[in-house]
Amino acid sequence: MKEQRDGLLGLCLACLLFSVYLFTFSGIYHSSDEMSMLAATDSIARRGALDIELLRWTGEQQGSYGPDGHLYSRKGIGTTLVALPHYWLALQFEGLGNVQTAMLTSGALTALTGLLVFLLLRRLEYARGVALSVALAFGLGTMAWPYARYLFSESLAGLGLMASAYFLLGFRDQPGPASPLLAGAGLGVALLARLNNAIVAPFLGLVLLAYLFRRNGRDWQKFVQPVLLFVVPVLAALAIIGWYNWARFGSPLTTGYLPEERFSTPFFEGLYGLLLSPGRGLLWYNPLLWAALLGWVPFFRKHRSEALLAGAVVLSNVAFYASWFLWWAGHAWGPRFLVTVLPFAALPLAGALQAMSRRRWLLAGLVALALASLAVQVLAVVVDFNLYLEDVYAELGLYHPATLFEPGYSALLQQWHYLRPGNLDLAWARGGAVNWPALTLGLLAVAVSGTALWAAWQKQVRRWTAAGLLAILGLASLRSLILYAPAGDIAQASHALAAMEREGEAVALTDSVLTGAFQNTYDGSLPAWGVPSKEGVQGAERGLWSVGTGAAGPAALRLQVGAVHVAFYPAQAERFDTQRLPVPVLATGMRLGQAVELVGLRVGGDTVRAGQELEVALYWRALAPMDTSYTVFLQAVDEDGAKAGQVDQLPCDGGCPTTTWRPGDIVGSHYRLPVARDAAAGSYQIIAGMYDLGTGEQLPFVDAQGREAGTYLSLGAIQVQP
């Protein structure tokens, strides 16, 4: 009964943490490390490949070249695989952003880690209130909260190590084959996330041996089975890592790290930097850990093995990274590498809470530290840390020592200056524009989860209630992602590309600025190469697509969506099949003169409100060369000829003038036709045509009998509403 209540209470706790992470969701990249791991996820999900050619423009900043010439991530495979289910799901639905959906992974991992912190402390016989308080302190009062919004490997590693410790503790209390096997699996997960977690393996192994010795004395035969069960999943993880290394770099022992990436920092400089430096010190970015330091002694007196394990996990990681050449982890909030150890560092807070509960002045100090910790994490959550870092690096140079060791340059002080609506790093307030439905949904999810946690505390929650809570959070997550559905030029261009592509083709993403947005919105299955020009792509046997900004050269198909172009270059000189167009294809093209015909169009709806925009897509096919650069016009006119809206634009917004069209080429543009605010309600015709801007001469509409029948094409009717 006790375990059932703890399980329900812990589940409600995890749901509350996840709902907070969902409410403060960002859904965008904050580091190239995230891009590297998720680019590998992208390749696996789309093509069953392992490369990160989407990031080829980064070169060896984020990857290394394998013997086959492809670029591969140097990161562990763990986070790449854990994000795969979310990513694959998003690929199946156009309305879900791929990157956005995958970014929920860390929130779920961190919420589960909070659950394990609670359950572990309950196994150690701490009161429910103490265990719950420590788990909430971990989830909301440490860097675990900001990093629940990003996709770094440390969150998964922390969950794996905490799971290992929890199941070892379960073996201590109830010996059986499942516990050591699950404990080894937890360590294996941590190794898959980051191989350096092997430094913790001896300490977990010693704890297992200590438990075995405590129970069996020197009866060594009883040690064999639990130790083997613990080791088997660890060996399986190492085998996966070896295979991953071999698949990428041709050897199971080659990780891809470069010679300059080594342990070159003076040890005590890195040690001070990781723990106490104003720029990246663990204790400043997590003020509650000062109380954990004080609580370690009472924690040790009561639970020696577990306290030693927690201390060993923290100190071994600090010692490991102290000499790393980039001990501060580059662009990050606080000491990112130490996010892994936060659940272990938080455990001694249980001892502090017990000791301080009898001394009110100490308890008041603990509350003050908790509020300070909360403020630090909120600061990181609401504003992207990159805003300040980019500014200070532009002033002082990349990774200037002052940003690490001089208090005046600490992000803890400078980040406050960036707190304004336009800088909010929240999906429901991107750019200062509030998405009210998403904000309301997020608040409701937090309120429902908080109420469920309170009810569980009051023993008023049953299993079906907890299952309902999980279902509600799942639906809230899905609905939030739909509300955050990516839109704009790159989304339209990516969807159009996915609708037109065929097997055997490839994509050249020629503008690196588009990488995150393209990956978030492209649901096709072609290999995508992040290269400065289409000449850098390999393996496009049947044709090559180019996606970028600015103008595209003559191609079988050119499409312009705002600032984004899509162009197709077939492997052999051939026409583009109009049946591949991402819009309804006209059974009989509508010709303008003898040189061009409209072969496909889409009008975005049959109603539009005054003051809004109507989306219209037009696809033209060149019939003959043209010596004149024609301008396309698009209008909404009533029966009296009064205009409700008009667009006049050179094809591809000037990027592909009609003088560059070759016979058979298809050129498309996606327009946003603005409807005037004072447009009268009623029925309007959408018309389109072309004219010479220099002379005003319009190309005539030529009907099926070859007769001129006016100077424009009629595309259909819409209703303008007030």
Image: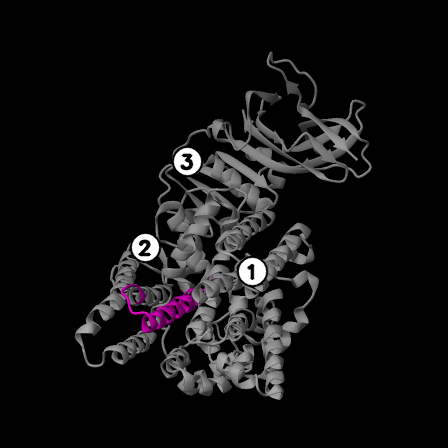
**Magenta stretch, main secondary structure class:** helix
> Where does residue 670 sit, x and y in percent of width and height?
61, 37
Q: Is residue 158 magenta?
A: yes
Q: Look at the numbered discs 3 and 1 and tell me whether their residues touch, using CB distance below 8 Å.
A: no
Q: Nearer the viewer, residue 358 or 525?
A: 358
| Element on which disc 3 rests | loop
Q: Is residue 167 magenta?
A: yes
Badge 1 is on which residue?
460
- Label 2 crowd (10 A; few <14 / some 14-19 / many >=20): few
Total labels: the figure holds: 3
Q: Nearer the viewer, residue 573 or 179?
A: 179
Closer mark to the observer between disc 3 and disc 1: 1
Instruction: Tell me which corner region of the image, top left, top right, bottom left or bottom right, holds residue 674.
Output: top right
> Where does residue 370 sit, x and y in percent of width and height?
59, 77
Closer mark to the observer between disc 3 and disc 2: 3
Left or right: residue 582 compared with residue 360: left
Instruction: Name above or below for residue 263 compared with residue 241.
Output: below
Residue range in magenta is 151-179
Badge 2 is on which residue?
69
Badge 3 is on which residue?
502
Query: What residue is shown at x 55% (from left), y 38% (from top)?
Result: 559
Q: Which corner quadrant holds the N terminus?
A: bottom left
Instruction: Tell me which corner region of the image, top left, top right, bottom left or bottom right, holds residue 640.
Output: top right
> Where does residue 173 sit, x and y in percent of width and height?
34, 72
Query: What residue is shown at x 43% (from left), y 52% (from top)?
Result: 54
User: For the residue marked with disc 1, what is the amino acid?
Assistant: Gln
> Where does residue 45 sit, x and y in percent of width and height?
40, 48
Say whether disc 3 or disc 1 marks the residue closer to the N-terminus.
1
| Element on which disc 2 rests | loop
Extreme residue in the top direction: 705
